[in-house]
Image (spheres, helix red, strand yellow):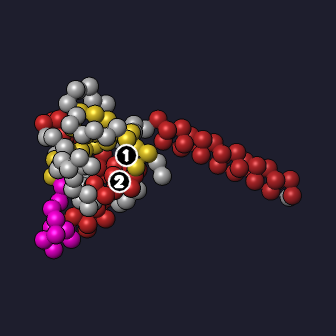
């Protein structure tokens, strides 16, 4: 009976390790959400804390005084959910609460919501001071990809 328990424990341990290895290899292959800005923005990297301030609409201007125009995807979009959780470390509904408080209190405005990543990239490329995000790498002289500094 003792040997049976040992074998069972060994099988469970090996199965768990295999499952974790597959899970982590799949996650590491998942595409990364990229933060993009209009080429007029002079930043090449930003901390997660700074991105949280920008996307929660608490920072409304770049360091040179230029207005920040924030574009986000609709809440149901998978890229928006991935961005909120993986980059900002916040659930999408928390961002919604922050934006609603700003709007309904009259203290600020919500970001501009777009329907697709393509629309976001077009808007960011056409709007000086704009920031957004997406899953695809962009080959455009009007958009720069920002390196996110993990905390």
Residue ID for mark 1: 46
Any magenta on residue 105? yes
The residue depicted at 20 percent of the width and 50 percent of the height is 65
Which residue of the protein is positioned furthest toward the front in this rendering?
A: 64
Which residue of the protein is positioned furthest toward the bottom in this rendering?
A: 105
Which quadrant: the N terminus? bottom right
Left or right: 83, with 41 as reference point: right
Q: What label sits on residue 50 in the rendered view?
A: 2
Relative to 47, say whether 120 is above or below: above
The residue depicted at 47 percent of the width and 35 percent of the height is 29
> Mark 1 packing: few (<14 Cα in 10 Å), some, or many (20+)?
some
Element type at mark 2: helix
Q: Which residues are magenta?
A: 100-111
Residue 70 visible somewhere in the drawing? no
Residue 44 position by quadrant: top left
Any magenta on residue 28? no
Left or right: 113, with 14 as reference point: left
Element type at mark 1: strand
**Residue 79 or residue 51, whichever sits in front:** 51
Q: Residue 67 location, x and y as percent? A: 17, 50
Q: Residue 89 location, x and y as percent? A: 40, 56
Residue 11 visible somewhere in the drawing? yes
């Amino acid at each position: 009976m003792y040997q049976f328990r040992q074998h069972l424990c060994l099988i469970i341990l090996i199965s768990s390790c295999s499952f974790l290895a597959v899970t982590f290899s799949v996650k590491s292959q998942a595409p990364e959400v990229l933060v993009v800005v209009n080429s007029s923005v002079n930043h090449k990297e930003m901390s997660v804390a700074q991105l949280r301030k920008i996307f929660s609409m608490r920072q409304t201007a770049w360091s040179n005084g230029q207005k920040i125009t924030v574009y986000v995807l609709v809440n149901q979009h998978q890229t928006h959910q991935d961005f909120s959780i993986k980059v900002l470390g916040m659930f999408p509904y928390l961002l919604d609460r922050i934006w609603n408080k700003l709007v309904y209190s009259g203290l600020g405005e919500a970001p501009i919501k777009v329907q697709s990543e393509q629309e976001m990239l077009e808007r960011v490329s056409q709007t000086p001071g704009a920031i957004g995000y997406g899953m695809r790498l962009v080959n455009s002289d009007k958009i720069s990809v920002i390196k996110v500094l993990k905390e």
